Image (cartoon, rainbow, N blue to C red):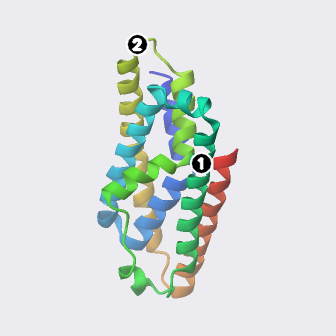
Amino acid sequence: MDPLYPFVFAGLFSPGPNVILLTTSGALFGFRATIPHIFGVAAGVGVIAAASSLGVSAILLAYPVAALLMKIAAASWILYMAFTLWRAKPADPKARQVAKPFTFLQAVMFQWVNPKVWAVSLAAAAGFGAGGTLLTEALRLSSAFSGINLFVCLFWAAAGTALARLLTTPRAWNIFRKTMASALALTAAMVFM
């Protein structure tokens, strides 16, 4: 087995912005409504992995201001999502109809400011090359990240959907929502590590 696969699995399965958002979406909107989000994350992660393999990291290293601006944008967007989730009112399960799950495109675009995806994909590009051409390495990383992450996303969305069965009161939903918002806000710190 290619050692890239367990590395990608461990990197993407562990908690981070996508895991938190997919679990929350599964709980709030159900599995079916989260499907565009799932496929958007899988596609977006594949694009970032290919970009990492093709040398985006060299650009970010050559232009530290660009890297800093990207970090600020990432942390700001993650904190905005956490703040929105924290403040969502009312904390009633019926209020789930007010908010909407990520669309496919929103999930793809979020990957560009997702610090965890960048960290894992840059590490994979640097540490798990198989000696192929630039294009074959980009395709190898992209397919590994997209394929593995599809199953990771399916798992976390299903876990959120199952968790929703336990959240039977407005208070339980409020605790869940604030816990997930807090966890999401903490991931913003990953940007600057």
The amino acid on which the numbered mark 1 sits, given as a three-letter code, is Leu
Side of 89 where 68 appears, left or right: right
Q: Which mark is drawn over residue 1? A: none
Q: Residue at x 42, y 36 (%)?
A: 145
- Report, in whole angstroms, how far the alpha carbon at label 1 lies from the one at label 2: 32 Å
Quick check: can you spot residue 154?
no
Side of 192 where 23 appears, left or right: left
Give the SS element for disc 1.
Answer: helix
**In the displayed structure, would residue 58 be above or below residue 147?**
above
**In the displayed structure, would residue 167 be above or below residue 124?**
below
In the rendering, at what x and y percent does residue 135 appear? 35, 20
In the rendering, at what x and y percent does residue 152 appear? 43, 47
- Which residue carries the number 1 mark? 69
Q: Residue at x 55, y 37 (%)?
A: 120
In the rendering, at what x and y percent does residue 176 appear? 56, 73
Q: Residue at x 45, y 64 (%)?
A: 160
Give the SS element for disc 2.
Answer: loop
Quick check: can you spot residue 145?
yes
Side of 65 where 108 appears, left or right: left
Identify the image quadrant of residue 134.
top left
The amino acid on which the numbered mark 2 sits, given as a three-letter code, is Gly
- Which residue carries the number 2 mark? 132
Figure quadrant of the C terminus: top right
In the rendering, at what x and y percent does residue 162 appear? 43, 66
Q: Residue at x 51, y 34 (%)?
A: 121
**In the displayed structure, would residue 170 be above or below residue 191?**
below
